[in-house]
Image: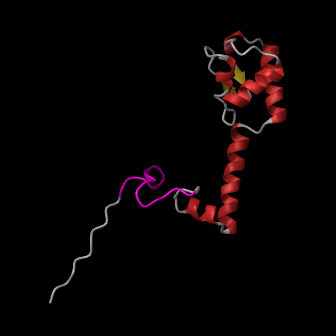
Amino acid sequence: MPRILGVDIPANKKVPYSLAALYGIGLKRAKDICAACGIELDRRAFQLNESELAKIATHIEGSYVIEGNLRREIQANIARFKEIGCYRGFRHARNLPTRGQRTRTNSRTRKGKKKTVANKKILRK
């Protein structure tokens, strides 16, 4: 399996799809990287030689933030939101959707499994 920046990419897939396995690189960005490095889009990752892998790695390092650094940056941004007390930080802290979705009926992914709350009993005289 070819390694780029410490991550094994799938060898039997075409190069753009293999590069999309890196965190922070999607298919569009992967195609842009291939175009910038002069690599055909229909080649497989195992067909790349060491110089082409090195060219891709230097291009990615120089142009994009990916993998661990990107994860750290995102976590730092979330911590900053919580610290300054903005709405998005408030929503992150309570594990609720941050981008305006409704929570009355949906958002089970974010809130977790349903917790049923019993109704209050009415006292009769």
Work out whether 79 lies above or below 119. above
Percent coordinates x, y for residue 114 in the rendering: 36, 56
Majority secondary structure of the magenta segment? loop
Q: Quadrant of residue 125?
A: bottom left
Work out whether 90 lies above or below 6. below
Percent coordinates x, y for residue 23 in the rendering: 66, 35
The structure residue drawn at horizontal position 75% and vertical position 13%, both measured from the top left corner, is 40
Examine the rendering and report whether any part of residue 69 can be seen.
yes
The structure residue drawn at horizontal position 82% and vertical position 15%, both measured from the top left corner, is 51
Q: Nearer the viewer, residue 3 or 74?
A: 74
Work out whether 8 lies above or below 79. above
Q: Is residue 110 found inside the magenta-colored segment of the image? A: yes
Q: Nearer the viewer, residue 22 or 88?
A: 88
The structure residue drawn at horizontal position 79% and vertical position 14%, both measured from the top left corner, is 50
Q: Quadrant of residue 81?
A: bottom right
| Magenta stretch bounds | 100-114
Q: Quadrant of residue 111?
A: bottom left
